[in-house]
Amino acid sequence: MSLEERIERIERQNRRLKAAVLIVGAGLALVVGMAAANDRFRGEVLIEAINGQRQILLQTHTDFGPAVVLFDGGGCERLRIGCAYTQGGAGFIEFYGPGPAPGQRGQFLRRID
């Protein structure tokens, strides 16, 4: 084996080693980043519009059960979809009218069980 062939072989190994270190480093950064992220929410998750207005609320309650709540343009609750623990876990959909003031739930209109 000539000197040129040896150098070429070492350079190939060096390139492979660099690629392996890069892949392992990227994987490690990904794992560390995922471990640092808080991927669990307790109680509720509120999704707001860019202007800060409430849009969707994902909610859990130990007595009543989980629900998804949708708000209108005034921030009033208009629709609630959930599971009622008090009724054996039965699903439901509740509709509400416009709220009397921004951020308040309006009159109960209808419930579908």
Image (cartoon, rainbow, N blue to C red):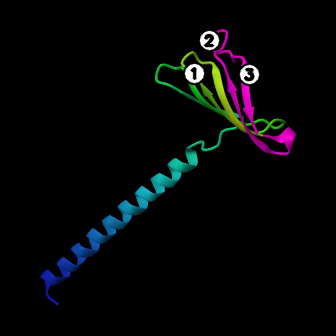
**Crowd tier of the residue under label 2, counting other residues whose Cα lies within 10 Å: few below 14, some 14–19, many 20 or above:** some
Q: Mark 1 points at which residue?
A: 72
Amino acid type of the residue tagged 2 in the rendering? Pro
Residue drawn 18% across and 77% down? Answer: 8
- Work out how far the residue at label 1 is from the one at label 3, CA to CA, in angstroms: 15 Å
Which one is nearer the viewer's eye here, 47 or 82? 82
Residue drawn 54% across and 18% down? Answer: 73
Q: Nearer the N terminus, badge 3 or badge 2?
A: 2
Q: Position of residue 65 (x, y in %)?
A: 78, 39
At mark 1, the secondary structure is loop
Amino acid type of the residue tagged 3 in the rendering? Phe
Query: Residue 24, labelled with which disc?
Result: none
At mark 3, the secondary structure is strand
Query: Measured along the vertical axis of the image, is residue 34 above or below residue 56?
Result: below
Q: Please provide the residue range marked out in magenta.
A: 84-113
Which one is nearer the viewer's eye here, 88 or 109? 109
The verdict on residue 85 being magenta is yes
Residue 25 shown left or right of residue 8 in the figure: right
Residue drawn 66% across and 39% down? Answer: 41
Query: Residue 108, labelled with which disc?
Result: 3
Question: Which is in the foreground here, disc 1 or disc 3?
Answer: 3
